[in-house]
Amino acid sequence: MSAWGFVFLAYGIVWFALLIYLGNLKRRFRKVERELSSLRSSGGLKKNA
Amino acid sequence: MAGTMQKRGRGRRVTGILALAFILVGLYFALIEAPPDAYQGDVQRIMYVHIPSILTAYLSFFIVFIGSCLFLWKREKRDDILARSAAEIGVLFTSLTIIEGSIWGKPTWGVWWTWDARLTLTAILLLIFVGYLMLRSLIEDENRGAVCSAVVGVIGFLDIPLIHMSVYWWRTLHQPPSILRPDKLPWENVHPSMLIALAVNFAAFILLYFYLLSLRFRVGEMEEEVKTLKLYGGAS
């Protein structure tokens, strides 16, 4: 492999891994946000009932 | 409370945008603007992500150390969430450091890996913090798990000064620092164009780190709130 091959391999792995982690974090964020808002609204309904 | 969350959300977005801008400028400096190294050639460009990665990991484990100390002292959940969030991201950056170093090592040293003191201590650092994250799933009592993890977080951080000093204390294949040297100023040892590329990439990594940490911390806070609401049925 040429020097640039090693460079692109390293940069590719770094930015791919960071993008995957960011995507995973965003998905977790949205999931827990949805769960929280549904729990809050059901809690609010219980209190009103 | 909602106002604070909105402010934090806005701050996070600004940090994210700044991180993206610095990443793009950093890539330009690292791959186009900076000259190839006189001895290593173009493969030295890996250093523009390798050094920021390990410095970001050190910062992350310092935050774990602070969060763990505060949690052991005050037993406040948010300190534990901060330490846990920083540990997760620190593990990611340490893994990337080892991978980048390995890719740089093959054309430079002729091997992907060697049991050099600095490399071995960095691998130990990674294992300590993987263990830190695993402890939580292994201990059923959540509070006990948090206390045990905090102790590991404090002890684990002590590996970092060892990693830094390893190149002075032992005869290692890993070269001593080129920038943070006690005998020379950074610009006396490294060409300014290389120093700029490194500085821009370091800023990009730090901004990205704080963006990820803020996002991960918010996830942790919301997960705690979900747990509380499930336990007390929204009465809290």
Image (cartoon, rainbow, N blue to C red):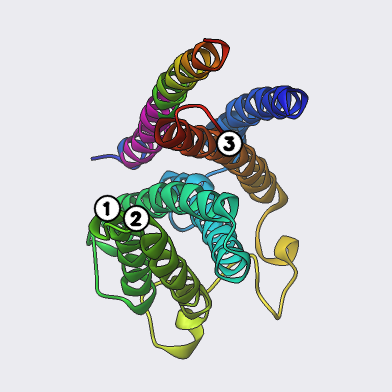
Whole-percent x and y of residue A17? Answer: 36, 35
Local packing at callout 1 (Cα closer than 10 Å; few below 14, some 14-19, many 20+) is few
Give the residue displayed 36% in from the left and 41% down from the top. Answer: A10
Task: Tell me the kind of residue under disc 3.
Answer: Leu
Task: Please check the rendered image and state whether residue A23 is part of the magenta-colored stretch, yes or no.
Answer: yes
> Is residue A21 shown left or right of residue B64?
left
State which mark lies toward you, 3 or 2: 2
Q: Which quadrant holds residue A2?
A: top left
Is residue B75 placed above or below B32 in the rendered structure?
below
Foreground disc of the pair 3, 1:
1
Q: In the rendering, at what x and y percent does residue B212 appear?
A: 54, 36
Q: Which mark is on residue B208? A: 3
Image mark for residue B133:
2
Q: Quadrant of the C terminus of chain B?
A: top right
The segment highlighted magenta reads A6-24
Q: Position of residue A45 (x, y in %)?
A: 51, 11
In the displayed structure, B233 sits above or below B104; it is: above
> The numbered mark 3 sits on a residue in which chain?
B
Label 1 lies in what chain? B
Quarter of the image for residue B117 reads: bottom left
Tell me which residue sits at (64%, 38%) in the image. B207
Q: Which residue is denoted by mark 1 in the rendering? A: B137
Mark 1–mark 2 contact, CB under 8 Å?
yes
Residue B37 appearing in the image: no
Looking at the picture, does residue B176 appear above or below residue B200?
Answer: below
Crowding near the residue tagged with mark 3, few <14, some 14–19, many ≥20 C-alpha atoms within 10 Å = many
**B21 or B46, nearer to the observer:** B21
**Left or right: B6, with B62 as reference point:** right
- Mark 1–mark 2 Cα distance, whole angstroms, equals 8 Å
What numbered label is drawn on residue B47? Answer: none
Tell me which chain the residue with mark 2 is part of. Answer: B
